[in-house]
């Protein structure tokens, strides 16, 4: 008792609560940082362009060039739209192949442990193959049409689907599964009413990754496919060969816009589906 | 490890049709039940316990003594390795330590779940669900998702879900353990009124001696693992029980006796 150090109280005065920031200042706080950062990037771009030797400045077109040579021209705008649609079609059909197959594989691996043991190493192996490197092979085997591009997108997007679904299914609350078992229902009912809803947010995270990869896959696949009616990837290569760098930039910007749109769409959908009940839904209770 | 989904509770169908001769008028009974898990853990060491219809038995014991295992055996979630259990698994209610509500379903849909799995018609489901929701005091929260409910309200929804099937035997696995004391005492009172109203046979696992005494007609003390029943106390108080009972001398005395028995069970 006698060994306790002597307490030496200090004075702590109250601080009146800071006023709530106004709506305008809150908007400013959320809008200003990205806008300023954007301006910084533009300045860096201009600086980089000006530091290039004049005969190499075509590598970085300026705003006027982008407008007069690309976005200002109706036929370029049409080409962007048309090719953008082609790219998105390839991406969507590719995912239309990988999502059902991936989900079935995920469910099978969940249901039969031996299947997980059998398939999982090869899934990882598939993931570790640089898909770019097998595009020439796919081309040799399947030609230059639509289907080989779809196959490439499917390969790009496949991995995330069965793995995230399996993870989600496995993390279904044991108590909930016990609850269902006590009612004597079969595993299909448990899968449908407990497993899949519970795995949906995890699967969705996988789908969001896959969707981004699908757009990338659709563009990359075309870098090797110059024949036939192509999408934005083909436009990139054509622009390079025709030395129309403004159009190449236009295609690049359109590609990014497509990826961002897909990402935003899936974020919005996820919010809509899970906001009410899942932590990932954004809005909290 | 993958979760094994297909495993129907065994003996389910016959139990409903053939009255069990071994039960001898008991609603639920364990006769010399042993449990050894595949990993070698010896959990139960000859537990015998019989519950007459309408009895409310509370089980207290040190953690890990196999109290919960007893409920899992009765329900068929795990199968015992020795002895006999007499139980009607078709009319068994079971609440877990957590509320185990499905987070993607609203309160009403959660309360309807077991009826849905049993194939009740939508109209009947809705009617019974509303009744049970009113009964547990969740009126007005039917369309809330579980994440917007407090812990006590989730437990109420969980009780309503089990009550909807009107179980003849109702097993509780420390349902109020995670709640604060004020909520817990309120839910104890609500559980007593549900018990008086529905007349089920109760088997209640808890860590709290006052809770055990307050709720039950009989308190059973289990030893540390491997679990055996080492003492049984009859609770002499009549229902309904009022919160003042908790401060009555006889109540404290009984709690004290059980506490001594429990300490003996742990130290032995």
Image (cartoon, coloured by chain):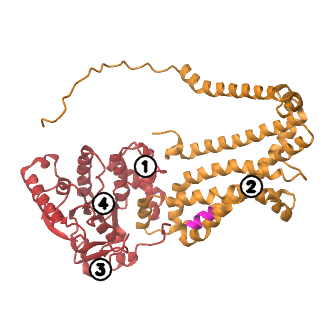
Chain colours: A orange, B red
Marks 3, 1 in one chain:
yes
Q: Are marks 2 and 3 on the same chain?
A: no
Q: Is residue B177 left or right of residue A150?
A: left
- Between the residue at mark 2 and the residue at mark 3, the CA separation in whole angstroms equals 57 Å
Q: Earlier in the sequence, mark 1 or mark 4?
A: 1
To which quarter of the image does residue A41 belong? top right
Q: Is residue B16 above or below residue A214?
A: below
Looking at the rendering, the stretch of residues picked out in magenta corresponds to A103-109
Tell me if I can see residue A78 in this picture.
yes
Label 2: which residue? A153
| Residue that label 1 marks | B107
**Callout 2: residue from which chain?**
A
Circles 2 and 3: CB distance less than 8 Å? no
Q: Quadrant of the N terminus of chain A?
A: top left
Q: Earlier in the sequence, mark 3 or mark 4?
A: 3
Q: CA distance from mark 2 to mark 1?
A: 42 Å
Q: Is residue A254 left or right of residue B119?
A: right
Distance of mark 3 from mark 1, alpha carbons?
40 Å
Q: Would you name the residue on which mark 4 appears?
A: B173
Q: Judge the density around disc 4: few (<14), some (14-19), many (≥20) Cα neighbours within 10 Å.
A: many
Q: CA distance from mark 1 to mark 4?
A: 21 Å
Q: Residue B230: percent from the left, percent from the top?
A: 16, 69
Left or right placement of residue A31 versus residue B204 in this view: right
Residue at the spot of label 3: B82
Front residue of A116/B54: it is A116
* Element on which disc 3 rests: strand
């Amino acid at each position: 008792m006698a060994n306790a150090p002597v307490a030496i109280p200090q004075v702590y005065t109250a601080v009146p609560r800071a006023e709530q920031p106004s709506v305008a200042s809150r908007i400013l706080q959320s809008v200003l940082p990205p806008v300023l950062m954007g301006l910084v990037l533009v300045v860096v771009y201009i600086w980089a362009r000006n530091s290039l030797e004049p005969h190499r400045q075509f590598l970085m077109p300026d705003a006027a060039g982008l407008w007069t040579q690309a976005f200002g021209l109706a036929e370029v705008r049409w080409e962007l739209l048309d090719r953008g649609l082609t790219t998105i079609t390839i991406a969507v059909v590719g995912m239309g192949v990988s999502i059902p197959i991936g989900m079935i594989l995920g469910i099978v691996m969940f249901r039969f442990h031996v299947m997980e043991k059998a398939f999982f190493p090869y899934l990882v192996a598939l993931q570790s193959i640089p898909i770019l490197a097998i595009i020439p092979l796919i081309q040799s085997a399947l030609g230059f049409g639509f289907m080989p591009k779809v196959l490439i997108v499917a390969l790009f997007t496949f991995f995330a689907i069965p793995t995230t679904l399996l993870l989600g299914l496995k993390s279904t609350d044991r108590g909930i599964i016990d609850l269902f078992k006590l009612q004597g229902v079969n595993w299909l009912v448990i899968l449908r009413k407990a497993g899949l809803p519970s795995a949906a947010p995890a699967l969705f995270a996988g789908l969001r990754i896959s969707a981004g990869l699908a757009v990338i896959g659709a563009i990359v696949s075309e870098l090797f496919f110059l024949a036939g009616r192509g999408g934005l990837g083909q436009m990139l290569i054509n622009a390079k060969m025709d030395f129309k760098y403004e159009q190449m930039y236009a295609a690049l910007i359109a590609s990014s816009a497509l990826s961002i749109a897909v990402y935003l769409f899936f974020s919005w959908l996820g919010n809509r589906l899970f906001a009410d009940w899942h932590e990932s839904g954004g809005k909290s209770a | 490890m993958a979760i094994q989904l297909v495993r129907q509770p065994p003996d389910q169908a016959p139990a409903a049709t053939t009255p069990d001769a071994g039960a001898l008028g008991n609603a639920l009974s364990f006769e010399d039940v042993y449990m050894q898990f595949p990993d070698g853990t010896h959990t139960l060491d000859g537990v015998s316990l019989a519950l007459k219809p309408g009895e409310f038995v509370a089980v207290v014991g040190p953690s890990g003594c196999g109290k919960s295992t007893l409920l899992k055996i009765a329900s068929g979630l795990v199968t015992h390795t020795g002895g006999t259990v007499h139980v009607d698994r078709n009319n068994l209610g079971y609440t877990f330590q957590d509320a185990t509500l499905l987070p993607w379903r609203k309160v009403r849909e959660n309360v309807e779940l077991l009826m849905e799995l049993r194939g009740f018609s939508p109209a009947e489901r809705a009617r019974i669900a509303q009744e049970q929701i009113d009964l547990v005091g969740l009126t007005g929260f039917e369309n809330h998702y579980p994440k917007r409910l407090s812990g006590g309200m989730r437990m109420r929804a969980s009780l309503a879900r089990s009550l909807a099937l009107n179980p003849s035997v109702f097993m509780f696995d420390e349902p109020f353990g995670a709640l604060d004391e004020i909520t817990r005492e309120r839910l104890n009172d609500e559980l007593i009124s549900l018990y008086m109203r529905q007349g089920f046979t109760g088997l209640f696992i808890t860590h709290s001696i006052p809770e055990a005494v307050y709720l039950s007609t009989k308190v059973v003390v289990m030893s540390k693992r491997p679990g055996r029943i080492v003492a049984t106390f009859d609770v002499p108080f009549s229902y309904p029980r009022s919160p003042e009972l908790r401060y009555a001398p006889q109540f404290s005395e009984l709690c004290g006796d059980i506490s001594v028995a429990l300490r003996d069970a742990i130290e032995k």
